[in-house]
Amino acid sequence: MESTNVSPVAETESTGITAEQAFELERVRLERVQTERELLQAKESHQRAEAEHAELIRAQAHRDAINASGVRFYENAIAEKLTAEFDVRVDAEGVATGVVDGKRVPLERVYQAVAKRWPTIADGRSTRNLKPDTGEMKAKSKADFPTMHAKMSFIDEHGLEAWERLPMRSARVVEVRTFSDYVSLPQSAKLELISKHGADWVGRLPRN
């Protein structure tokens, strides 16, 4: 049986190129394959880096929002998962928002809404000043803001003047039945009662 093997010289002669040229073409082909492989690896590495960076921004946005909400959750990770119910979005600059009652609001408002919808996942002492309808934090005094993030969030939303008008602490909730009860109150509590009931209300209190 005759051999069908073709010698390198015969093969190059059939294509019209020399062995050296064939070797050079093969070297160029291998270099191109290697370059394409390296470019693909670089692209995949860049995509991973972008994804990791986006995750860092997202995670930081959620941490900041939890701090700004003023709510102390027992497990932040659980609260974060529940925010998926509010169409949360975090852009490339870390600006985070969600939808509460049909309106797109800052992410800290979403966490406040989460605390109202699922009250068992948060410390009740940190949610007692949340409005039942919107979940927004009611601001009665500077002491009602447990973190610096919460204070700055209030200032950003309402302005520095509104912050300065807040008393240092909320007035005690007391039942005023007589003029003596009224006299024993601190000035801030007296002003709050007068603002609520009117100046004539004090004169109508019974003396004893």
Image: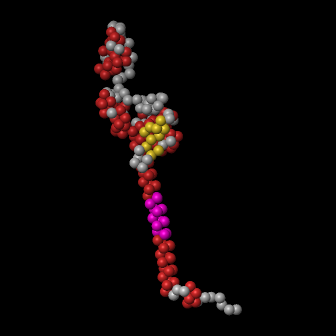
Q: Quadrant of residue 123?
A: top left
Was residue 41 drawn as part of the magenta stretch in this picture?
yes
User: Which residue of the protein is positioned furthest toward the right in this rendering?
Assistant: 1
Q: Residue at x 35, y 23 (%)?
A: 171
Residue 72 occupies which quadrant of the picture? top left
Magenta residues span 36-48
Q: Is residue 37 left or right of residue 177?
A: right
Against 201, is 43 above or below? below
Nearer the observer, 47 or 197? 47
Residue at the far front in the pictured view: 16
Determine whether, in the image, residue 104 is placed left or right of residue 201: right
From the viewer's perspective, is residue 16 above or below residue 115? below
Q: Main secondary structure of the magenta part?
A: helix
Asked whether the viewer can see residue 72, the reply is no
Please tell me which residue is depicted at 31% across the width and 17% down the height of the picture.
184
Identify which residue, 22 or 137, lies in the foreground: 22
Count the marks: 0
Residue 59 x, y percent position in the rendering: 43, 48
In the visual, does 89 lie left or right of 167?
Answer: right
Q: From this view, report whether residue 135 is shown above or below residue 2.
A: above
Q: Position of residue 161 (x, y in %)?
A: 30, 31
Q: Quadrant of the N terminus?
A: bottom right
From the viewer's perspective, is residue 203 above or below residue 163? above
Instruction: State the image coordinates of residue 191 (x, y, percent, origin top left).
Output: 32, 19
